[in-house]
Amino acid sequence: MDRLPIRIRLTLAFVVAISIVLTATGLFLYVRLGSSLDNAIDQGLRTRAADVTALVQQAGTGPGDATKLRGPDSGFVQVVGSSGTVVDATPGLTRSPLLTVAQVRQARLGPIFRVRKLDSQRVRLLAGSRNALPPARTAGRHSSR
């Protein structure tokens, strides 16, 4: 390295320094934007859960006949009873529970967020109990992360 001209040494030092700065900036932006996206999805799930709660509390209305909740990007809802079986769900959604028995137990204690695969797509789920959301309800939205 002593025999290299000063121009090449300076260029190499500059390239290394700029590479470190660009890598650090890219990592920061990735983490920050990912966190913001997760927060936005979580807030959307909370809003959707509040809508579902209002619909379920109306006599005889559930996600299966809730036309207000349908749309191209409206996500899905699944209502799981205390026995762990699916009581109601948006049309076209699987009738098997989206959460494990352990996750349903955990959701009874307070709202939980989970990410899982559904039909080869990653989805983010919000589940909660009757107090936070009525009996172990699950609201989900497709996630790009």
Image (cartoon, grey):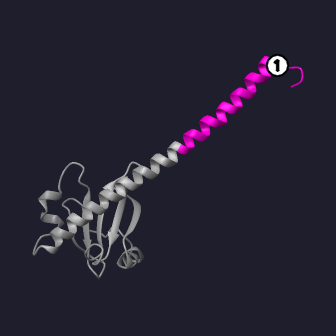
* Residue 56 location (% of width, % of height): 17, 71
Outermost residue, bottom side: 83
Q: Is residue 106 left or right of residue 8?
A: left
* Residue 142 location (% of width, % of height): 33, 53
Picture residue at 29% right of the left edge, 78% below the top: 131
Q: Is residue 66 above or below residue 82?
A: above
Splitting the image into 4 quarters, where does residue 112 fall? bottom left
Give the number of callouts: 1
Outermost residue, left side: 59
What amino acid type is highlighted by mark number 1?
Ile
* Residue 35 location (% of width, % of height): 46, 52
Q: Residues within 10 Å of mark 1 (few under 14, many from 20)?
A: few
Q: Is residue 20 left or right of residue 25?
A: right
Give the labeled residue for mark 1. Answer: 6
Q: Is residue 54 left or right of residue 19?
A: left
**Could you tell me which secondary element the residue under label 1 belongs to?**
helix
Q: Is residue 120 visible?
A: no
* Residue 55 location (% of width, % of height): 15, 68
Q: Is residue 33 above or below residue 114?
A: above
Q: Is residue 65 visible?
A: yes
Picture residue at 25% right of the left edge, 59% below the top: 76
Give the dominant element type of the magenta stretch: helix, strand or loop.
Answer: helix
Splitting the image into 4 quarters, where does residue 107 fall? bottom left
Nearer to the camera, 108 or 28 = 28
Picture residue at 41% right of the left edge, 54% below the top: 38
Which quarter shows the N terminus? top right
Is 139 one of the magenta-colored residues? Answer: no
Q: Is residue 2 above or below residue 26?
A: above
Nearer to the camera, 54 or 138 = 54
Residue span colored magenta: 1-28
Is 3 one of the magenta-colored residues? Answer: yes
